[in-house]
Amino acid sequence: MKILSVIGCRPQVFKLDPNLSDVVVNSGQHFDEDMMDDHLKEMKIKPKYNLGCTSNEIGKMIDKIRAVLQKEKPDVVLVYGDTYSTLAGAIAASIENISIGHVEAGLRSHDKSMPEETNRIVADILAKWKFAPTHNAMRNLMEEGLGASSYHISDPLFWSFNYFVPLKKAKDFGTYIFATIHRQENLVPGNLREIMDGFGKIPQKIYFPVHPHTARILKKNGIKIPKNVEVVKPQSRKRTLERIYNSKLVITDSGGVQREAYWMLRHSLVIRPVSEWVEIVERGWATLLPANAQRIAEAVKEYKHGEMPELPRGNPYKKIKETLEV
């Protein structure tokens, strides 16, 4: 059986097992070297194809993936998560009549104003195999009538997370806040300005690996970065995990960072109205917040740790392979 994987964004690098895929296609959605190339090297993944398509070129992305599929003729196409690369890979495979497996299936924010929600729903509908990382994700798929072709496989991101632990305790342990902001709704200038104003009201130092698109919006709109914020380029996976581990608290809008913080017993202030990772919120390790400066500053003072996390179990890639071979 020939398996082809379509990726395009940094988090998808960490959800892919190169030993499971015969061919890896990188759409190019994250074109920045710090966002993609360095992470591919870190995880020892060498895409056979680099398509050079951004998130504004979904039609072009679909056409290029179709051309690859016509050449490679895989038996299965695996897509990951909820990005435009996920959507393009699923649509291209469907047009070419190739079976699809969706890794991280069944996650729902129940907010269709988010592009990610549409991407994951379409991928689930098109996929022959829906690989769910959580019991809640499985429940969503069952409620949507997709349970018969769904499989609980555990969390691929947690499996790769374990390659980097244990993490070293730094001299500044517990003295700063780790922050990331990149979601479309938070990059509206008014919202991003509120978030930066909120950062400025926080007495602790904030360590802020800034997404290239976030950096462009900040500069274009003249949004000032507070003095207590240390801006750095996107970091390696290992460095990112070390900085989360050594932080006091996390402020983010990232699904991946929420999970990594949760596994390391760090509370996340999530600048979103909803989260598809409902377990983290329910267990008290994430607080959902609007992009409001005062609310962010208050939440830094008021947050509490939750109950002991329930960690994923089992090798998700082994379960995927076993399912595909049946």
Image (tube, grey):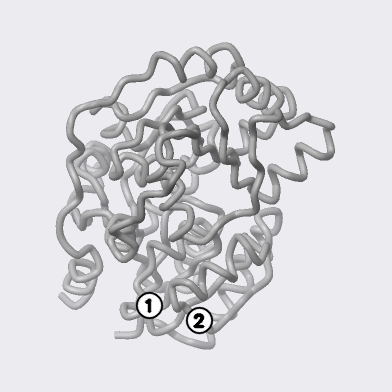
Quadrant in which residue 35 is drawn: bottom right
Q: Residues within 10 Å of mark 1 (few under 14, many from 20)?
A: some
Left or right of 28? Residue 167 is: left
Q: Residue at x 45, y 85 (%)?
A: 73
> Alpha-carbon distance for marks 1 and 2?
8 Å
Mark 2 packing: few (<14 Cα in 10 Å), some, or many (20+)?
Answer: some
- Residue 87: horizontal and vertical position, in percent? 51, 56
Which one is nearer the viewer's eye here, 294 or 59? Answer: 294
Tell me: residue 12, above or below residue 318: above
Camera sees residue 130? no
Q: Secondary structure at mark 1?
A: loop
Specify the amino acid type for callout 1: Pro
Vertical order, 178 against 35 (above or below): above
- State the residue in front, 274 or 39: 39
Q: Is residue 324 left or right of residue 183?
A: left
Residue drawn at (17%, 41%) of the image: 310
Measured from the top left, where is residue 3 in percent x and y? 36, 79
Which of pointers 1 and 2 lies earlier in the amino acid sequence? 1
Question: Where's residue 45, x and y in %?
Answer: 46, 77
Q: Amino acid at mark 2?
A: Lys
Q: Name the residue beneath numbered marker 1.
A: 18
Asked if marks 1 and 2 touch (Cβ < 8 Å), the reply is yes
Q: Position of residue 86 (x, y in %)?
A: 49, 58
59, 314: nearer the viewer: 314
Instruction: Give the residue drawn at x 53%, y 13%.
Output: 295
Residue at the spot of label 2 = 46
